[in-house]
Amino acid sequence: MFTDRRIERHELSRFLQVFNRFTNKPIGYLGNVSDDGLMLISQLPMMVGATFELCVKVPMANGDVQAIDLTAACLWSCEDVNPQHYDSGFSVVAAPAEYGQLINALLRYFSFDPLQASA
């Protein structure tokens, strides 16, 4: 039986925290992202149909934090498989170029390249 892990797992949902852009209060964590939307994991359900001003704080290699502000509309919200958590789907209404850069960085970071793994 295979017991040694070659690729370290990273819990994305506890890594990139999402805040209210105006109050700087935490709302939840990113569950996943795409060019057009994102899924938020939170402890409270989000109001479907409402537009939110969000801020994703991305830790940088030098210890600084890059804030990426975006506007997103909540399309759905439902209970997560984990107790006392909710998943909410958002459509991105407006986002800076840094949001696209974040998506590309996450794709590179979490992608598996079999050619590099065998080296």
Image (spheres, rainbow, N blue to C red):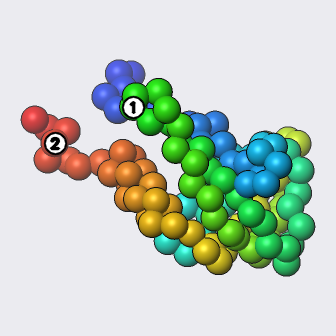
Q: Is residue 87 above or below residue 35?
A: above
Left-right relation of 111 to 36:
left
| In the image, farthest residue toward the front | 22
Q: Secondary structure at mark 1?
A: loop
Q: How far apart are the two marked residues, 1 and 2, measured between alpha carbons? A: 23 Å
Type of amino acid under label 2: Gln
Give the quadrant of residue 52: bottom right
Q: Earlier in the sequence, mark 1 or mark 2?
A: 1
Whether residue 53 is visible here, answered yes or no, is yes
Q: Residue at x 52, y 44 (%)?
A: 66
**Residue 95 at x, y = what percent?**
56, 69
Q: Residue at x 14, y 47 (%)?
A: 115
User: 65 or 81: nearer the eye?
Assistant: 65
| In the image, farthest residue toward the top | 4
Whether residue 42 is visible here, answered yes or no, is no
Number of numbered discs = 2
Q: Residue at x 23, y 49 (%)?
A: 113
Q: Residue at x 35, y 32 (%)?
A: 7
Give the quadrant of residue 119: top left
Q: Which residue is mark 2?
A: 116
Left-right relation of 111 to 55:
left
**Residue 107 at x, y = what percent?**
38, 55
| Front disc: 1 or 2 | 1
Q: Is residue 71 above or below residue 28?
A: below
**Residue 79 at x, y = what percent?**
84, 56
Task: Tell me if mark 1 has few (under 14), some (14-19) or many (20+) residues whose alpha carbon lies within 10 angstroms of its own.
Answer: few
Q: Which residue is mark 1?
A: 61
Type of amino acid under label 1: Ala
Q: Are marks 1 and 2 in contact (CB under 8 Å)?
A: no
